[in-house]
Structures are given as C-alpha cells and as structure tokens.
Amino acid sequence: MTSQQLDGFFKSLLDIESFSAIDPSSNGLQVDNDGGSIEKIAFGVDACLETFKQAALSGAGMLFVHHGLFWGAVQQVLGNHRRRLQFLLDHNLALYAVHLPLDQHPQWGNNASLAKLLGITEAEPFGLYHGRKIGYKGNLAEPLAIEDAVRRIGFMDRVPLGVYPFGVRENRTAAVISGGAANEVLQAIQEGVDLYVTGEMSHQVYHECLEGGINMIAGGHYATEIWGVRHIMEECADQLQIDVEFIDVFTGL
C-alpha cells in the first residue's frame, strides 16, 4: 500500500480530525516516503532515532508512533531533530503519528485498553482535557487489590514507576488516563473513585492523594501507552494483511 492509502485507513479507524483544536501534536502523516509501495509497518511509542534504526532494520517502509516529531509550533531543523529527519529521508521511512486520538479511542485506545485490563465494566468517559474527556472510569467486575491491578497492567511484567496505596484495600471503582496525567487524580478524588491509574506521578499531588484517600498507580508513561499502538498494529495485520512488527524501545519512565 502507499502512504496515502495507509493515511486513509488510519483516519477511518481513528477520529484524528476532531482533535485538531486541542492536540498539540501534528496527527497523521508527518514524514512521507518517495511514493513507493509499503510492504511492512513498524509500530512504536516514540519517534526517536533508536526506534527509527530498529524499524529500518526490520525492513519497514512506515513507522507508526504515539509521540511524533512535530508538536504544532515551528521547529528549527537542528541537532537531534535534524538527525532524526535525515535518517527517515535517507532510509525512505515514512512516519505516522497519532497522539490524543489514540489515547481516547473507545475501542483501540490506550485508556480503553487499560480499563479493559483492569476489568472496568460499562466504562464511561473521564478526565477533562480542554473540554474533552480522554480517559475512562467505571465499576470493577470484581474487587481488586492494588497489587493485582499492577500485575494486570504491567507490560512484560515491568515494574511501575510508583504505587501509592492510600485508599481502600479492595478497589471497586477505577479511572484511567495514560501518560502524563498526574493532576487528573484530583478529578478522580472529586468523583469518589477508589483507584486511579496513569503513567507519571507528580510531587505536587502526592499529599492530595494521601489526604484524599485514593489509591494511585503510576505505571510509567511509556508502559501505559504501548497498548493503543499495539491494537492498531493488530488491526492493520488483520484488515490489511500487511506485515507488522512492534518496536519496543523501553525508557523505564
């Protein structure tokens, strides 16, 4: 398939256009190839040189990522940014990025995936961000200790950044927003949620969690945002019958 055909396919899966007013990422095709056919797509979390190198070695003609190279503002082509772009062009590797639309998607998104892993039933939107709710919350199918929740969301059994057991022993409700959404725990406290799961913790909300009596897991920005990428990869393999590969460049953060 060509990059333009793949662009149409991804836009048919993900609600990319409706996020243009609030998402600083330039969602969609960020770097094109020379127009030739793409036989394999690599998938990863970050648009970085290490991911690019592994994608090229795998024989991929396109790399689909969650965190792209362009974030709205004009960026000078210098230093690492120049080297990254040069590598893509030298290796004829197209780059496709989807940020908030991949976090929010109710079926394949990072947050819906985390909600499913935890066993949230009848998930409803949660977590306002510039007027849109991008996370999910709901009742758990069964009471869940925080240690069990850690195991359920742990990709390759990797240790989370932090676990804060400041609430009930058995969680009956949970809310999730992947990535850097520590401050949104305040919304979870306000709504009476037992367990809040995100990627990163923030010093400024530690005592809010302690005094608010909520359990919180900071699973890692990277570790909470591999799920949407992998689900889209599976859809590509299933619907397009194209060769795919997940590039795991773990940051530990």
Image (cartoon, helix red, strand yellow):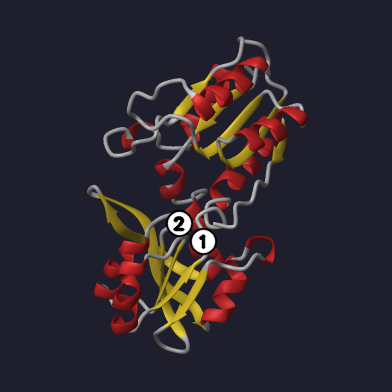
Q: Quadrant of residue 55?
A: top right
Q: Is residue 240 visible?
A: yes
Q: Which residue is mark 1?
A: 114
Residue 100: quarter of image: top left
What amino acid type should be assigned to the residue bearing mark 1?
Answer: Leu
Q: Nearer the viewer, residue 241 or 110?
A: 110
Q: Position of residue 184 (x, y in %)?
A: 31, 63
- Work out which residue is located at the far front of the displayed protein and give it: 79
Please state, as top left, top right, bottom left or bottom right, where the N terminus lies in the image.
Answer: top right
Of the numbered discs 1 and 2, the one sitting upstream in the chain is 1
x 69%, y 37%: residue? 237
SS at badge 2: loop
Q: Residue furthest bottom?
A: 169
Location of residue 52 in the rendering, given as x and y in whole percent from the top left corner = 65, 31
Q: Which mark is residue 239?
A: none
47 vs 42, left or right, is left
Above or below residue 6? Residue 221 is below
Residue for badge 2: 178
